[in-house]
Image (cartoon, rainbow, N blue to C red):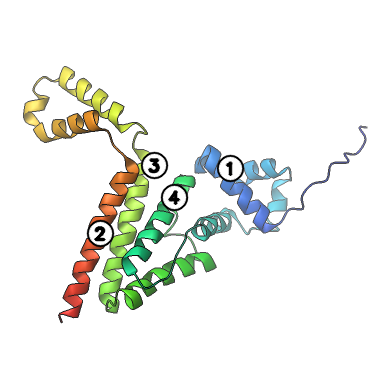
Amino acid sequence: MPPPSSEKRTPLNRERAIRTAVELADTKGLGALSMRNLAAQLRVVPMALYRHVANKEDLLDGMVEVVYGEVDAPTGMDWRATLRQRATSMREALRRHPWAVELMETSSPGPANLHYHNAGIGCLREQAGLPIRTAIDAYNLMDSYLYGFALQEKTLPSDITAAAETRRHDLTTADPSFASRFPYLIEIAEELGSSGYDYTGQFERGLALVLDGIEQLRHEAQGR
């Protein structure tokens, strides 16, 4: 028999299991994450995981909590700057962990999740001075924009300029009447093909529109 290994292994605990699961999902995608694969990554038998996580759903909840924990939810007197920083930080976290966007609003909330949401509503209520119903509307608008943009960034081609030009060429070659029937789609493809597409710039421009909308809600609420 081979001599016992002298290598010291890091003891398995809940935090290590969840952090390793996050790394696995980051590198190989959520589809590659299973309790068996995670156990192999940790060099333990699958049953050992169940001493630290109840099941895969519990594991996913812990992974989402890690993502929420990376988001900066600042507080300050300027509501617009606070919301902008919060949104930018969330986008950065979802770029690091693109698998998380589909789980953010369905996981069981942990402390970081609760703090993130409470801070967002608190900013709209206290700093922006919105009534609770208007704050809910504004909050939903912000999150819809954030998660919608993150989903697009995850699924759209990394090089939209090249993809747009290829798509335009393929469509017009296969159907010469395409350009006359769908002129605005061709216009979009030509614009993106010539000027490119900057995800960060697009995100910031869209976020400015959302914040302008919340500003309008503030004026309407104050005028009541």
Which of pointers 3 and 4 lies earlier in the amino acid sequence?
A: 4
Name the residue at 91% across, 32% down. 2
Q: Nearer the viewer, residue 221 or 175?
A: 221
Residue density around tag 1, few if under 14, some if 14–19, many if 20 or more, within 10 Å: some
| Amino acid identity at mark 3 | Lys
Q: Read off the residue under disc 3.
A: 154
Query: Distance between the Cα atoms at labels 3 and 2?
Result: 21 Å
Instruction: Give the residue at x 27% y 79%.
Output: 131
Neighbor class of circle 3 (other Cα within 10 Å; few <14, some 14-19, many 20+) is some
Q: Residue 210 shows which numbered tag?
A: 2
The answer for how far apart the CA atoms under marks 2 and 1 are is 34 Å
Of the residues tagged 4 and 1, which is closer to the observer? 4
Name the residue furthest left.
Answer: 180
Instruction: Write down the residue under mark 4.
Output: 92
User: Could you tell me how many numbered marks the image carries?
Assistant: 4
Q: CA distance from mark 2 to mark 4?
A: 18 Å
Please report whichever mark, 2 or 1, sits nearer to the chain's N-terminal start.
1
Residue placed under numbered mark 1 in the picture: 24
Label 1 is placed on what type of residue? Leu
Nearer the observer, 184 or 211:
211
Real-space Cα separation, disc 4 to disc 1, in angstroms? 18 Å
Viewer-proximal residue among 36 and 108 = 108
Sequence-wise first label, 2 or 4: 4
Give the percent coordinates (x, y) of residue 1.
93, 32
Please tell me which of labels 4 and 1 falls first in the chain.
Answer: 1
First reached walking from the N terminus: tag 3 or tag 2: 3
